[in-house]
Amino acid sequence: MRTRILILATVAVGVFAVTLPSSAGTIAKTSCTSIGAKKVSVGRLYTCVKTGTKKQWNAGANCPSTVSILTLSNVTYACKQSGSQKLWKVAVVPAAPTGLAVTNGDGRATVRFTAGASGDGPVTNYQYTLNNGASWVSFLPTKKVSPVVISGLNNDVAYTIKLRAISKYGVGKVSAGVAARPVAPVLPPVNVTTATIRLVSPDVNDALTVNDAGDMTYFVSQDWFAAGSQYFFRAAVASAPISLTYEARNQNGALITNHEIFLRVNRANSGSNAKFSTSVGDVNGMQSGAGTDSARIPGMTDVHGRVTFTFSNTDLIANAPDFPAGVSLNALRGSGKIIGQVAPMLVPDGKTTTNFGELDQISDVLNLSFFKEPVAPVEEDPNVDLKPTIDGHVIGNQLWKDAFTGNAGAAPSTSNWIRRYCGQTAANGGGSCYGGERQHYIPDASKLDGTALGNLVITTTHLASESNSNCGVDWKFCDFNSGRLDTQGKVSFQYGYIEARIATPVGGGNWPAFWMLGDNINEVSWPNCGEMDVMEGKGAFPTLTTGAFHYSTDITNWQAHSYNAGSFDDGRAITGRYHRYGIAWLPDSVTLYVDGVAFLTRTPSTLNPNAYTDSPGTAQWPYTQPFFLILNNAIDSPLDGNGGFGGPYDGWSTSQMKVDWVRSYQLDGQGSVVQH
């Protein structure tokens, strides 16, 4: 969970020490007037006093560093040059980009522009909006130069595109609009003697898929498929829809566009036994020796040479085997499963569907093996130390645990946890409620459920109307209440295996997290203190969990932030079900786990120094000092066009993140816990 904390940098002007604001906000330049004859000017340093009838600070008093005086633009400020007071800089947000021009393409617009003046700080990102919409979308990955490409547009639809820049002092001015109307290019047909058809989605390199080169070598030797074909095994959930996207190229490598293609389901002699519902009707499984395919789903390649087929497995869930607990999906391959085989086929020019065969093309063949989606897991007794096991390590004695037992509605142990309001200081558990998030954090949202085995429940509630009470400094209004708690100043951890059993909330927009920050955050700031995200959920992507390591590439510049991230796709819904999220932490390595399966490892030599920032430097390794734990559920804003990190909010009224327990163990003889 990327932190954005109010950092105060000290500089010297004459003999006076002054304090400049960080990216938390900016004084409204247009409403700041001077006291006395001296005109307020950009780049000068002033103390600021809010005037008017609502609320005042006395003339000459310090501006509070944690009050939203920095972001309110509808009030008047009186500013004067100061002597020994703390000073604030009148900031300038970036000027609007100019010289916009657009080139239309198939479902995309390439926008070129000239950047405006950056003002008091470099531009960190550009954003666009379509047709004067309220949502602004960041160019991803972070894009700071022209041209940029906006994709996912509809062909022959008129759009008005506007741009703005973001700097450390705020949101820049909006450009004039530029018109776009994407048009699909008309491509001439290509000659097709032979074809190569590759599976491009889902990713054939992900954790759910095995490339069985050995079997394909045998198939080629039997003249069942052309040399170069690939054979994949993939685990899937019984009765769930399946969508497969393929890309076709001809013998010269050119895309085969606007060409008929079909998907063979349970091909002849495949021995498949699954049943499917397809666009041409229901399909029964074929047994080995059958002379024809079970079905051929028709399709047409588009201007990119791609086609997507969607179908469903109609076998009853009861007929599918269970996912064994704690076993990788790829390890479940074997006999006796419900299986189905699919392969794309494109008829070459001059041939028909009956007078060509597999040797006329190279294809990606997919063997699907179906399993039952698991039911609710068996409850664990928090008083029993079920010591975990992970490959390549020895897990030793338990050092600390919290099983969250207690009366229903009670706060979790105050010896271990602090429940937070929103705040922007490092002392506030590393800060919370950042500019792009939509939630208030309130202590009452995090409570014990009172069950015999015990759970911490973080309840997130969609509010009937927006409010700015307890909301983030950079975000004036929030429409959710949620919870955040941490062990800062109460319990510190250094090395070992730390694991939590968590059921993440169901619903788009939810951004649950189990993460850690360095105890020294108040002294060195973020990201120098280091951050380890053991689990970050994506509510709109229920099969996926992610994790990351954040660090600095320049300890003298708090903006020199970089990170390495990884994801774990279980192929079935993770949300709403308990899973174990762990970190194996040693002085020279950190590894993240889901249910004992590793998915991201980093060492000092494998940190990417420039994964996020353009700042030069060397990746620092901050993971050699004590850290504290954090649990929270955020609601992200839709600034990236996808509804934010948690995806788009989809209308739920409440969601719950449940934590069964958190435990810490020695790992390979290392690990310590300090109760303050």
Image: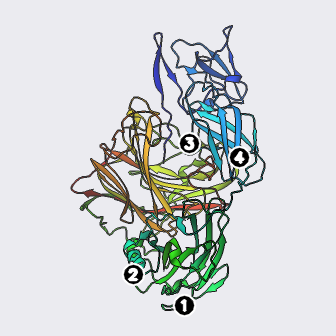
Label 2: which residue? 334
Q: What separation in Å lies between label 4 and label 2 (alpha carbons)?
A: 50 Å
The tag earlier along the polypeptide, 2 or 1, is 1
Task: Give the label, 3 or 2, closer to the camera.
Answer: 2
The tag earlier along the polypeptide, 4 or 3, is 4
Amino acid type for the residue under numbered disc 1:
Gly
Q: Is residue 326 visible?
A: no
Q: Is residue 321 above or below residue 137?
A: below
**Residue in the picture at 70% in, 23% down:** 30
- CA neighbours of label 1 inside 10 A, class few (<14), some (14 to 19), many (20+): few
Label 3: which residue? 434
Q: Secondary structure at mark 3?
A: loop
Q: Is residue 631 above or below residue 237?
A: above
The number of discs equals: 4
Viewer-nearest residue: 333 or 446: 333
Q: What separation in Å lies between label 3 and label 2 (alpha carbons)?
A: 48 Å
Q: Are marks 1 and 4 in contact (CB under 8 Å)?
A: no
Task: Give the label, 1 or 4, closer to the camera.
Answer: 1
- CA neighbours of label 2 inside 10 A, class few (<14), some (14 to 19), many (20+): few
In this image, 425 relative to 151: left or right? Answer: left
Amino acid type for the residue under numbered disc 4:
Asn
Q: Are marks 4 and 2 in contact (CB under 8 Å)?
A: no
Task: Give the label, 2 or 1, closer to the camera.
Answer: 1
The tag earlier along the polypeptide, 4 or 2, is 4
Tell me the quarter of the image containing the C terminus.
Answer: top left
The tag earlier along the polypeptide, 1 or 4, is 4
Label 1: which residue? 291
Q: What separation in Å lies between label 1 and label 3 (alpha carbons)?
A: 62 Å
